[in-house]
Amino acid sequence: MTKIETVKHDDSLARYADIIALDVYPCYLLTVDGKVVFSNGAAERLCPADQFEIGLRTWPQNAEFLRRSAKSTNPKIGRMVLQQNDGESFGIRGRMARLPARSAVPLVLARLDPGDVEDQYQRLRSESSQLQRAIRARKRSDKRFRQFLDSAVDGIGAVASNGRFTMANSSLSKMLGVTDLIGKSLFSYVDMGAALHGAETPFEAPADPGAFLEKVSGTPLEVYVESVEHDRYPVEVTFTPTDEPGSRQFVVVMRDITARTEYRDALDRSQYLEAARDIARANEQSKTRFLATVSHEMRTPLGAIATAVDLLLQNNDLKPEQRQLMELIRGSSDTALEQINNTLEHVRMDMRPIKDHPVSSFNPSQVLTRLANQSWIAAEAKGLELRLALDCQSDQQVAGYHHLFQRVVQNLMGNAVKYTDTGHITLTARCDRVTKNDGKKQFLAIEMSVADTGKGIAADEIDRLFDPFETGNSDYNSLAQSAGLGLSIVKRAVDAMGGSIRVSSTVGAGTEFRVSLSFAIPDAAVKSASDETEIPAPETKGFRVLVVDDNPLNRDLMVKLLHSEGCIPHCADSGEAALEAIRTNDVDAVLMDVGLPGIDGLEATRQLLAQPGHADMPVFGLTGFSDSETRERAGIAGMEKVYVKPLRRPQLYEIIHRVRGSAPPAPDMPEPGPIPDLLDKSVSRQIAKIAGENWSVFVHQLHKECLTTLDHLRNALDASACDDIVEMSRKASVTVTTVGAVALNQNFLEIEELAQKRLLDDLPVLLDATEHLLEETRLALAML
């Protein structure tokens, strides 16, 4: 603060000086010519009085500002330029006002506004605050980033160019079994030279770790980890270089791929198993067809033997010993024929899906009564009593597999008569109405039992009683009587109908078989099993038929049947002979054996229908074994329908009705919808066994891949990319087949077929159904 001598002798100046001294802003008392009379402390800190005077004299704008303020009674605001002690100038706002003339010397008050300096100070304070906030935000970000790293499943860290860790998250520490990895060498725990698909020479740490890491950067590597706490296991590791000031760093990401490699190994094994399965299935199919062919060829001569013996037994001139021998031949041929029929039935159940068995409406009470009456003849011949106890409505109809139901009763009754020497046989059945599906559907529950007083079955033999070719004991006489297929057919038929069968037996006292079945109560539209016998006899006289069969016995039987109905038969023993016969004979229909040697029946049919004037010729197929594939191929060849040999009279009537159109032919048996088998469990269980405890991971990965494929298929569908759809669905089909997902495989094959045909409108619904089926398949696989 500066005071000059004038202030001391002038009271007015003294009062002004006291007031100015208390002001926080820099203030100067000036004379009109620029002399500083008084300055306060703030002014001295900003610009001392002598420097202020120099500034007034040096810069004209300052002098002009003072001159204008001294002349005016109103305060003036302006900008001044002042100089600091170090000689550096600065600008500042100021306000000057002439004071009232109370003192001896006219004075001007200059009051400066150090806002510019204050602004700089405030900016510095603001920048400092921002820097502090940024530092705190960086610390919080570092903390969150660390938490993120530690929560990651994968191991994440950083390695310097010397190969030592500079940072590692908790997952990486756990994977390597080391609590503190900082400063440890990467190559002490990771075997970079161990490839997963073939061992190499032992890996040694590189002399220049940085150069080595630079070389392998950017590519995921599958290597082995030598954990401190765990065994050697595979991981996938990726190195990414990053520039750090003063050093070269590499980000390390490490992932445990034990489950992936086990899945891949299981997939490789499953592909081997798939090939083995295909070979086994081909062998099984070949064996099955061989059995069917041999059994069929044996049945034909045995049927002829039985027919010939029947004719001879009608001769009353036979001597007693001759009749006895004929009866022996007849009994032996009947036994052999029964065993062959059982073999054919067993083969048919192998080759014929359940959906290919006809569904019909039948009366259980009538079927049981009729089959009991048939068994009564054989039982009476052995001196056995046959008892029948039915608790079923006599007029109750059910819808189901009539053929299989009849086969179950026939085989159980036949076994009871065959293996019972004394006593009785009892067939009991109880029928009760039940409701299912929340009362929307009615069913008839049948509890049936066949009990005998035979020799009984040992407890250790019951478990294998239903196995094919098992006779219950190794006694030679029993083996001579049975091929061991009867009960196997019963079990398979009961399973196919969704029922159950139980056995209880006491050696020396007898055996009881109890069967539980359930049949739907049919609508009026379901065909009755007896409809086939209700076809009215047509006018058969003069109906001309060409019979084509390479077996002379079959031809003779057909000729006798046709002659007995007044038809006119023509015969041919081969496909070539049939083509020649059709040119020289005028016929109304052709009965064609499907399995002809040389030109088979299907090819002969195609060539026959291609001849001029014979495009509309009705051709009916004859075969000893019919399945869906045979019927489909026959339909493609042009056959009207396929019948199983021998042709019966009602079937002949149906053929004549079809050809002449005199009455509507009997409708084909309706087929039920296929029962969806989600899995081929033999394959699925084998793959599950291979996967072991990793099966759930295996199933999850398969489910995830299929979902991704379905998403890609939908995208390809939106783009109408049919080729992409075909390729993706084909790959998906192969994938799901390896685990035995047969239903899912069928859906992907249908998607592929539709895409090949460019029928894209049906794909959205099929894709949605496939996704639903995928979830069902996932649950089924998970339950194995």
Image (spheres, grey):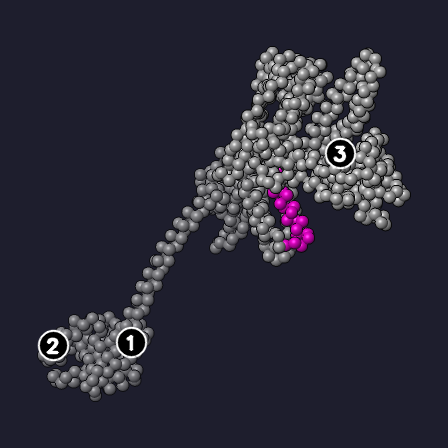
Secondary structure of residue under mark 3: helix
User: Residue placed at 48% from the left, 37% from the top?
Assistant: 177
574 to the left or right of 43? right
Residue 547 lies, in percent from the top left, at 83, 37
Left or right, residue 624 beside residue 776:
right
The one of 250 and 151 positioned closer to us in this rendering: 151
Residue at the image position 61 percent from the left and 41 percent from the top: 525
Q: Which sits in the foreground, 784 or 503?
A: 503
Q: Which residue is mark 3?
A: 649
Give me the disc on residue 92. Answer: 1
Segment tinted magenta in the rendering: 740-760
Q: Quadrant of residue 582?
A: top right
Relative image position of residue 228 (x, y in whole percent): 50, 35
Q: Residue lying farthest bottom?
A: 71
Type of amino acid under label 2: Arg
Residue type beneath disc 3 = Arg
Q: Residues within 10 Å of mark 1 (few under 14, many from 20)?
A: some
Label 3 packing within 10 angstroms: few (<14), some (14-19), many (20+):
some
Disc number lying in front (3 or 1): 3
As drawn, 231 above or below 423: below
**Under tag 1, what secondary structure?**
strand
Q: What's the distance in space between the residues labelled 3 and 1, CA to CA?
A: 129 Å
Q: Nearer the viewer, mark 3 or mark 2?
A: 3
Is residue 758 depicted above or below 385 in this figure?
Answer: below
**Going by the image, does 755 lie left or right of 646?**
left
Mark 2, secondary structure of its residue: helix
Where does the image place residue 499, in percent across and percent down from the top left?
A: 57, 30
For disc 2, the marked residue is: 15
